[in-house]
Amino acid sequence: MGNEEVQRCYSVEDDDEALACLKKVVKEDSGSCKPKLVLLTQDSCSPCKEERELHAEDIAAGIIKEVSVDSPEGMIIAMKNEIDIFPSLILVDCNDAIINPDRVDD
């Protein structure tokens, strides 16, 4: 698994299939800078609660990591990636930088 697989996932047009592909990459990648799916949430946010429930199984399995933007880690991820809409499900590298389709060849 690697950048080629992430790029393939990003090229999938169906959102559900693309997410399933990314979850597989996260689950199976064993590289030195393993990507991770992060669900950024906010404590008093109704849509965040819905997303948390939608992804509960993957959160429990460790495939998606829920991080509150109200926590120090969440604040750093949100600021570093200029995210101000919550909930946000993002794919990040080992340095918590978003892996964008146009950056996959890093």
Image: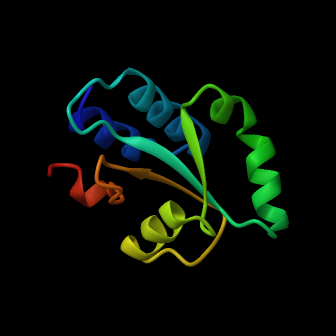
Q: Residue at x 43, y 76 (%)?
A: 79
Q: Nearer the viewer, residue 86 or 6?
A: 86
Q: Is residue 58 above or below residue 92?
A: above
Q: Residue at x 85, y 65 (%)?
A: 46
In the picture, residue 97 is in which quadrant?
bottom left
Q: Nearer the viewer, residue 30 or 106?
A: 30
- In screen coordinates, is 37 left or right of 4? right
In the picture, residue 89 is in which quadrant?
bottom right
Horizontal and vertical percent for residue 65?
A: 56, 43
Q: Where, quadrant-wise, is the N terminus in this rendering?
A: top left
Horizontal and vertical percent for residue 42?
A: 70, 67
- Name of the residue lying farthest toward the left: 106
Q: Nearer the viewer, residue 81 or 2?
A: 81
Q: Is residue 4 above or below residue 82?
A: above
Tell me which colouring the rendered structure shows: rainbow
- In screen coordinates, is 5 left or right of 25? left
